[in-house]
Image (cartoon, rainbow, N blue to C red):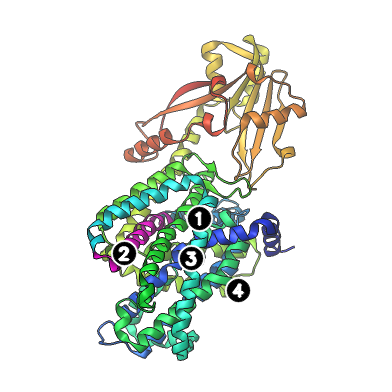
Amino acid sequence: MSHQELTASADAEAHPPATFWSLFVGSIGVVYGDIGTSPLYAFKEAITAAREGHEGVSEFAVFGVLSAIIWALVVIVTVKYVVVLMRADNNGEGGTLALMALARRALKGTAGFVILFGIISAALFYGDAVITPALSVLSAIEGLKIATPAFEHFVVPLTVLILIALFAVQARGTAKVAAFFGPIMLVWFAVLAASGMVQIASHPGILLALSPHYAIHFLTSSGFVGFMTLGAVFLAVTGAEALYADLGHFGRKPISTAWLGLVFPALVLNYLGQGALVLSDETTLENPFFLMIPEWSRLPMVVLATAATVIASQAVITGAYSLSRQAIQLGLFPRFEIRHTSESHAGQIFMPRVNNLLLVAVLLLVGLFKSSSALASAYGISVTGTMVVTCLMAFIVVHKVWHWSILKTCLLLVPFLLIDLTFFGANMLKIVEGGWVPLALGGVVMVVMYTWRRGTTLLFTKTRKIEVPLDDLVKSLEKRPPHIVPGTAVFLTSDREFAPTALLHNLKHNKVLHENNVILTIETATTPVVDIAMRVRMEPISEKFRRVTLRFGFMEQPNVPKALAVARKLGWQFDIMATSFFVSRRSLKPAAKSGMPRWQDHLFIALTRSANDATDYFQIPTGRVVEVGTQVSI
């Protein structure tokens, strides 16, 4: 069975008919909020850029811009993401880090550039995750000024209140948020389609813009103006990356069905309607989206648009949770608390610390820029940068994992790469006007990720030099046994071949050894869930020592006591009340000579201190834990 068939089969099993439609509606509310609100500004900005240096609106520019927008939606969103990339999942998870993990596995983990690609794309996605809520909510509240100019002085305070409320409800879980947002967005897309169809019925000739000929002719004959226009055209596809990043939340089938069956047709109809309106009356270019709505319905439309643009930020927020969890599993971030918010769909999670950091960054942007027009120039660079890197990693996956030939892989992906690079170049023209914001945010995240990965590697290398092989220690203890005390001691370690630091310190300072000693290692599998029968692996070392390995899927919350209960079926009898868990807690300090600059040492130490406590993370009863502190220079 091919990779695509396996993915489709797994997707069908993961989403039975009973839950499919709830995931379908939920994906409309969460995944498509960003791209679904682009008609508010994308066509207006693109046609304004296209008429640079010219008076009036030419039919040539309108048809060229419309064709470019529609075919950007077809090529980038429909073909690249829905048809191709959403099949490149890592056990149900999507996004750039899922691609990175697949590419590393295909290259046997030896390609450092793949890790660099993953870090760059993830960092740029976080830049987008901060800008999108700030821009969408600001534009929503500014839209209310159309109805009541009195709102003008309250734009920033109202934006701050709405953002705080939006991030506060995330703790309720994606499913509950989506259940509320989904129906609103269903109405939104229905209104988009209906308002566009009315204008198309009056000017059916606008349907000729569906031909790619107009886009090609406009871009090739307009020179630098055409290139600049591409930066605005790209506003129509911002949010496409969320389709892939939110794959773990809703699954491929609900997301792709929602796009092809509702979202894509509604967007095309609305853009065509706006083009028809501007051709018939160029004064409507001031705000073609609202001016093609009957005057009596504009106030309700402003309210609906406000709700839709607030919802738009949800796509990148949930995408940031998925990305952060994968970054932790791949060793790019310290351990943060992860809460699973759905019993039926394990990909739906909430991360309090990520949520709070995003909120602080978003509020800072609102306070710094104070208007959506000031933030608009910052939009696009992070998304196009992510798309370029995603395409490069997809090349490795398609060639190595799907086993396509180099020629077939090039024929599939090189056209996408050229398109992404063109859009990226067009958006780079905005750096001075505000495009530096996502690049700066991405730079900060890249430094954090690189520092954490480099620091953990140095720490592992340094501690390995002073550790004792476990088998050698056990033989030594058998020859000269210390005082034996009753009970069971469980020593947590990440390396099952070497004696845990807590064991060595217990022998050195307390000079005792328990009658039963367990060297416990916890592994994260590459599958979402691990079968109970495969949960525990035991290996006796001696009469008093045994190795125990617990395996959890990457979507499971590790629960050590519950997993150890499974070991009883394998013959290990123990009483949790007579068991002590020994955990090493390292206290780090900068070394005189380090493998990193001093500032990076301090950053790594701060990140280590911020990591979630292992006792809480593995759900070990705090009353049974003995922490042994050690000081390590790095």
The residue depicted at 31 percent of the width and 58 percent of the height is 437
Type of amino acid at the residue the image marks with label 4: Leu
Type of amino acid at the residue the image marks with label 3: Ala
* Mark-to-mark CA distance, 1 and 3: 22 Å
388 is higher (above) or lower (below) than 443: below
Q: Mark 3 points at which residue?
A: 240
Sequence-first tag of 2 and 4: 2
Image quadrant of residue 552?
A: top right
- Neighbour tally class for label 3: few under 14, some 14-19, many 20 plus, Cα within 10 Å: many
Residue 134 is covered by the magenta coloring: yes
Q: How many marks?
A: 4
Q: Can residue 418 be seen in this view?
A: no
536 is higher (above) or lower (below) than 500: below
**Discs 4, 3 touching: Cβ within 8 Å:** no
Q: Name the residue under label 4.
A: 407
Is 545 situated left or right of 372 in this image?
right
Q: Name the residue under label 1.
A: 180
- Neighbour tally class for label 4: few under 14, some 14-19, many 20 plus, Cα within 10 Å: few
* Mark-to-mark CA distance, 4 and 1: 46 Å
Type of amino acid at the residue the image marks with label 2: Leu
Q: Mark 2 points at which residue?
A: 144
* Mark-to-mark CA distance, 3 and 2: 27 Å
* Mark-to-mark CA distance, 4 and 3: 27 Å
Residue 490 image offset from top left, x and y in percent: 61, 23
Q: Is the magenta stretch mostly helix, strand or loop?
A: helix
Sequence-first tag of 1 and 3: 1
Under circle 4, the secondary element is helix
